[in-house]
Image: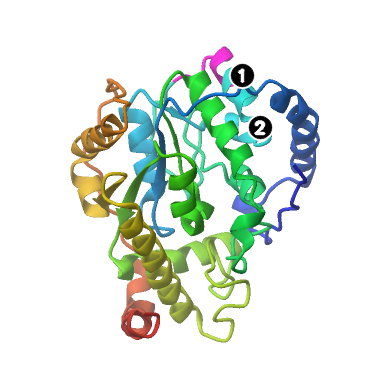
Amino acid sequence: MDVIPRQDPAFTAPYAKDPQEEDLLRQLNAALAPVEESAYLDLEEEHSTLHVIGVPRSGTTLLYQVVAAGLEIGYVDNLTAAFWRAPVLGRRLARKLGVRGPESTFDSAFGRTRGVGEPHEFGYFWNHHLRYPGLYALPEGHEETVDWGMLRTVLVNMAHWERGSIAFKPMLLTWHLERMAREMPRTCFVWIRRDPHETALSLLSMRQALHGTYETWASLRPHGPDWLADEPPWRQVAAQAVELERTIATAFERIGEESVLTIGYEELCSAPRDVVERVRGLLASKGSAPARRSTPLTPFQPRRSEQLEHEFGERVDEALEHFTAALR
């Protein structure tokens, strides 16, 4: 498979990537990819694959951490994520080094977790296989350029080495949910939903933290790299929250509730143990029922963007009302 160069924006110092380390990992992955691919087995889809889905800043990372901590399920940790073109080798290395299950802090910084055993969203992997140079939507017809057979092979082999279900948090899959469900019928989705007001404010906070300004786009951008370029930031994030939520809702309505579990952010925070049990029930309905881990799961305090409420709250509400009507 040819490699799509990834285009990353400049990040502020706390989130900046080391160019030398990035180059080392690219070389390492290029060397390991042929070894990995030559060892893939031709397997049936025996185990369920779980995808944590939601609008950016809706609680997807916390949900992923809770699922990984609460169930005996495979997931991509921060070590494995370094091997995005050789994920089976990465998972085997993690296991060899004793990276088993997370003793999670349930903390993160805009999707980034700390600690070698914490879940990672595996962005480079999804950029590579779904053929996205960035985090913006590509034109109609792009889906047909994806090698879905290879992606299926990789995911099935990862689950095979896990000897059970495996969970991911694939942001870019937002635009390909129905295709994923068709390619792998045992696929399960857990969809987390949050008040769009809080989501939009959190997206503004993310912009400031990652880029040092509210003006620079952060995370998934619907309809291409120039979408809403002339709008102010608070209207951009409102439209982003509304459009991505609608994209997900439309896809899941077509996929059907037998493959989709919907979780509210407030529910996740107040009753994480109940959420884990519901996720386990969804997996069981697809033929997998992972055991519960002994990790204690106590309620979380929901995060609020209180510092931005005074400056942007009313303007975000006006924009949400506008785009909810306009983007139908």
Under circle 1, the secondary element is helix
Real-space CA distance between mark 2 and mark 1, rounded to the nearest whole angstrom: 10 Å
Q: Is residue 36 above or below residue 254?
A: above
The numbered dot on residue 215 is: none
Q: Is residue 138 above or below residue 193?
A: below
Task: Find the magenta span and give its range.
Answer: 94-100
**Camera-side residue of 317 and 226:** 226
The colouring scheme, among rainbow, by chain, secondary structure or one colour, is rainbow
The quarter of the picture where residue 43 lies is: top right
Quick check: is 97 in the magenta stretch?
yes
Q: Is residue 204 above or below residue 74?
A: below
What crowding class fits label 2: few (fewer than 14 Cα within 10 Å), some (14-19), or many (20 or more)?
Answer: many
Is 101 positioned to the left or the right of 296 in the image? right
Give, as a three-letter code, the residue at label 1. Leu
Whether label 2 touches label 1, CB < 8 Å: yes
Q: Residue at left 58%, top 13%?
A: 96
Where's residue 221, x and y in %? 54, 67
Q: Give the residue pinned by disc 2.
A: 83
The numbered dot on residue 93 is: 1
The quarter of the picture where residue 48 lies is: top left
Q: Quadrant of the C terminus?
A: bottom left
Quick check: is 252 in the magenta stretch?
no
Res. 78 visible in picture: no
Where's residue 159, x and y in %? 49, 26
Under circle 2, the secondary element is loop
Res. 126 visible in picture: yes
Give, as a three-letter code, the residue at label 2. Phe
Q: Residue at left 30%, top 57%?
A: 193
Q: Earlier in the sequence, mark 2 or mark 1?
A: 2
Q: Residue at left 60%, top 51%?
A: 14
Q: Residue at left 19%, top 45%?
A: 270
